[in-house]
Amino acid sequence: LTDRSQNPTHTWPRLYVDSPLGAGTVLTLARDQAHYLVHVLRAKLETPIRLFNGQDGDWAAEIAHISKQSVELRALRLLCPQTAEPDVWLCCAPLKKQHFDDTLTKATELGVSRIIPILTERTQIREVNTARCRLLIKEAAEQAERLTLPQIDEALPLARLLAAWPSDRTLFLCAEAGSACPINEALTNSRLDYKAKHALFVGPEGGFSVAERDAVLKREEAVAVRLGPRILRADTAALAALACWQASCGDWPSTKGPVK
Ligand code: SAH
């Protein structure tokens, strides 16, 4: 584990940029990021910065130029090479108010690779502001020292998602009722099929309907899983399932610490 107290870099502002990164690369920040860096993070010319773009690893950078109109950065050296990250999808119903925001940011911290908002019979929130969700996710990924951003899809009806479901991806339906396998057992069984990819399905505040449960479970790649004997709120269930997944199938068993 890298001793974070010895590494000043984790105190540096860290930004996701949508441009290539290499030694000497100069890039101009978009207005909103420039504003965030200068006025929110109060970065000055001599402030060291960290940059990542989801492909080229984590880079130390300097502020080459600050003006009213724009901020220019120069990438200097690679701090941490890009490494493969676990591939787990979270397919969950949008939730009311803060609960969905919390689910998005915490699922990002928990290493989710893709978030698919699903509209189910009992979903109460039918409109998702995906652009706003992307901003929440980006900030969570910057703070969590991730090397990639999770992808988030436009919300879509459960039936449409199932119609296009990839057959190589196991679908763990989190079910608080009916027959289900304890999640750690289901994950251990599935991990034996090392090539399997995984997705976690969590319902809305009112749960999945019986028809939805049947529609999902009739697929051969679907497994119903239990998250213990208590009824969890949907946001709790999503995060608990992701934590179980990372501990069992993801990158928590490794001792590698955060990026240097
Ligand atoms: N239908 C229940 C609550 C649903 S909780 C009721 O009205 O009381 C919202 C979602 O969280 C569920 O759809 C399910 O995906 C998940 N969930 C909650 N508790 C769970 C548990 N103990 N095991 C598995 N999934 C659970």
Image (cartoon, helix red, strand yellow):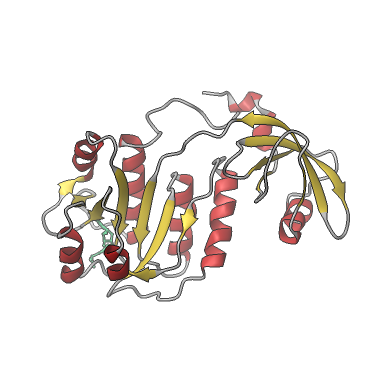
Residue sitting nearer the eye, 86 or 176? 86
Residue sitting nearer the eye, 219 or 61? 219
Q: Is residue 214 left or right of residue 18?
A: left
Q: Position of residue 33 (x, y in %)?
A: 72, 56
Residue sitting nearer the eye, 22 or 147? 22
Q: Position of residue 220 (x, y in %)?
A: 16, 53
Q: Residue at x 36, y 75 (%)?
A: 124
Q: How many marks?
A: 0
For ligand 1, give the image quadrant.
bottom left
Q: Is residue 63 left or right of residue 246?
A: right
Q: Is residue 101 left or right of residue 32?
A: left
Q: Residue at x 20, y 61 (%)?
A: 216
Q: Residue at x 16, y 69 (%)?
A: 210
The image shows residue 235, relative to residue 4, as above or below, that is: below
Q: Position of residue 165 (x, y in %)?
A: 29, 59
Q: Position of residue 120 (x, y in %)?
A: 30, 71
Q: Is residue 170 left or right of residue 58?
A: left
The image shows residue 239, relative to residue 7, as above or below, that is: below
For the C terminus, the image quarter is top right
Q: Residue at x 85, y 60 (%)?
A: 69
